[in-house]
Image (cartoon, coloured by chain):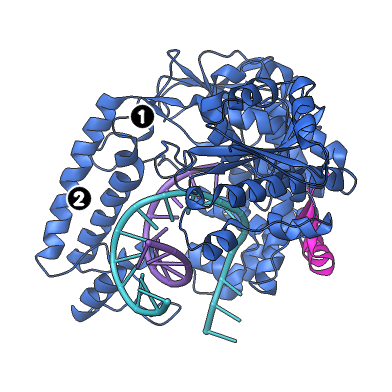
Chain colours: A blue, B purple, C cyan
Amino acid sequence: MTIAHYGPSPNPLEDWHTLLESPPERIAIDTETVSINDITLLGVGLCSDGDNGFYISHEDPEFGDVVDIILQNPYTSKVYHNAPFDLRVLRAYEADITNIDDTLLMARLLPEPVATLEDLAFWVGRQTNSMRTLMDAFRVSKASELPFEVLAEKCCRDSIVTRALYDYYASNIDMDYYHWLRPMISIFNRISRQGLKLDQDRLQELNKYYLQKVSLYRQLCTAQGVNPASPQQVGYYLASRGNFLPLSKKGSQLVTDDEHLIKLKDPMSHVILNFRHHSKMESTYIRPFLGLARAYTTLRMDGRTGRANSTKAGQDQPDRNLQNIPKQAERGDAPSIRGAFIPDNGVFTKLDQSQGELRVLAELSQDQAMIDIFLANEDIHGYVQQRTGLTRTLAKNLNFGLMYGGDVQTIADFLHWTNLSLVEELLARHRTMFPRAWEWLEDQEKLGLSQGYVTTRRGRKMLLPVEQGEKHMRNCARNYPIQGTAFECMVDLMTEPTIIEHLDITRLQVHDELIMDGVVVVEDMKLNPTETSKEGHPVYDVRERMAWLSGFYLPLQVQYVERWG
DNA sequence: TCGGAAGGCCC
DNA sequence: GTACGGGCCTTCCGAT
């Protein structure tokens, strides 16, 4: 037995044949895999009416028909709960990724904590069990070890709940917003499965370089009886050599992070810092890519502000987080790590929404001074620098500190100023430069505290966290609308016809940056004679239609590079 | 074997 | 006397 039915229908066999003979307009699908880490497919659950679920094992002779008629059918809307996961599982079956709905994505459009499918089932008058519950009940550690009937029923129930949830959300969320966002499901899936080409020669070179350094610094530490990878041992060791280090939050060990160790005169603290840096590069950014022709990621949209996040998917899968590859790994003669990511088509086109978040703040707050600066394409950090006498870096920190809600103490810390009243004065001066921006941020705090959520420019409500206290909630209230709106601008860009046309060569999105593989000439592009990238490439600005995509001025910078970074 | 803590990389 | 927003991942280490 490799097909099962769950539900009230008196003629399930007939229903099953109807399903395959005339595929429904919309069907919910749930996949079952061996385990979370091993995402090998076991079978899929299907539900089109919200009451009757069918489960079919991937080994069933009819499974191929299900793939052809349902999974690959672009005319049927396929509803998944957490589509990036299921589509990742189904990648080998070439399931359609263009006509997809995602009830988890829909759920995130409500300003409520995201519940499990088990809990959500309640809202649609249905019931299902979590995999954890079932595995505990049957004392097994993998889904594949559950009895067939049990797994089949769970999968049927999940697909039934998913199908019911679609209708529930369709009448409870802003469907205009959802339909505007929906193409991103396909776009991110496309990007995820395409991957970036890797330069294995460069990776070998990197590997050799970093392994040699790691082993050198580790030896220097183990000679002293210290494991440099253990913060506990490092803290104890450095303290025993007469260094002062504060106690960590929990009070169980000493703080040994970069910021503290860099201040110590002890040469061993620098040995440890060097070990940490090189071992981080080797273990996180080099080793995982060795021997792979391409680097892959799975892009999702499950952050609090809607932003895309990049993760690995399953233990044996090549997917990795590609959004945090080191930008300036250059230390000494080390080759760049980003340089190991290369184009298939000779050159990358990088599109950058320059000063995105500050421009968004200007738009949301309608601060005239900020708007004027940005419309004139003037440098806001330079503007603040001139009027405060700070260095450019610190002026930049001040501007960002504003968006994140940094208080006087925090700002004093990064300025390395001890006189708090001077910092107060500095902030007061900043406030007079951008009065509406300050007011708007304060209004967001009030609004957020009173209603529990804040809103993006297009109206997405973002739930604020309450667990971490009021100060944190206030900071989030300031930042979420900016971050969430910046993401919306990236969506506007990525779904714009002349950009989406190049989807097959779109390789990665890193929040305010889009990387395309090959030469893409963007409309209205102009050479900006004042700017050159760090690699010496000319930088182009897009100043016309493309810069107004989201309804306010957000210019793009375009660069062509032979490697990433 | 699992999960929290610490540390560190990105925007 | 406290904490600057969002994310992911590796390693260690103690609890189970």
Q: Earlier in the sequence, mark 2 or mark 1?
A: 2
Q: Nearer the viewer, residue A156 or A274?
A: A156
The magenta stretch spans residue A368:
no
> What element does badge 2 sit on?
helix
Query: What kind of residue is marked 1?
Result: Gly
Which residue does the image show at 41% across and 39% down from the upper left?
A327
Q: Position of residue A98 (x, y in %)?
A: 69, 24
Q: Is residue A367 visible?
A: no
Magenta range is: A442-463
Quadrant of image for the C terminus of chain A: top left
The vertical placement of A358 against A139, above or below, is above
Residue farthest to the right, as pictured? A171
Q: Quadrant of residue A68?
A: top right
Q: Position of residue B6 (x, y in %)?
A: 39, 69
Q: Nearer the viewer, residue A432 or A329?
A: A329
Q: Quadrant of residue A486?
A: top right
The magenta stretch spans residue A446:
yes
Query: What kind of residue is marked 2?
Result: Val
> What element does badge 1 sit on?
helix
Q: Quadrant of residue A101?
A: top right
Q: Is residue A58 visible?
A: yes
**How many residues crowd mark 2 within 10 Å: few (<14), some (14–19), many (20+)?**
some
Residue ID for mark 1: A339
Quadrant of image for the N terminus of chain A: top right
Q: Which label sits on residue A214?
A: 2
Q: Position of residue A26 (x, y in %)?
A: 80, 31
For the residues labelled 2 and 1, say whether their Cβ atoms are less than 8 Å apart. Answer: no
Say whether residue A197 is left or right of residue A531. left
Which residue does the image show at 12% across and 60% down from the upper left?
A220
Q: Nearer the viewer, residue A406 or A159?
A: A159
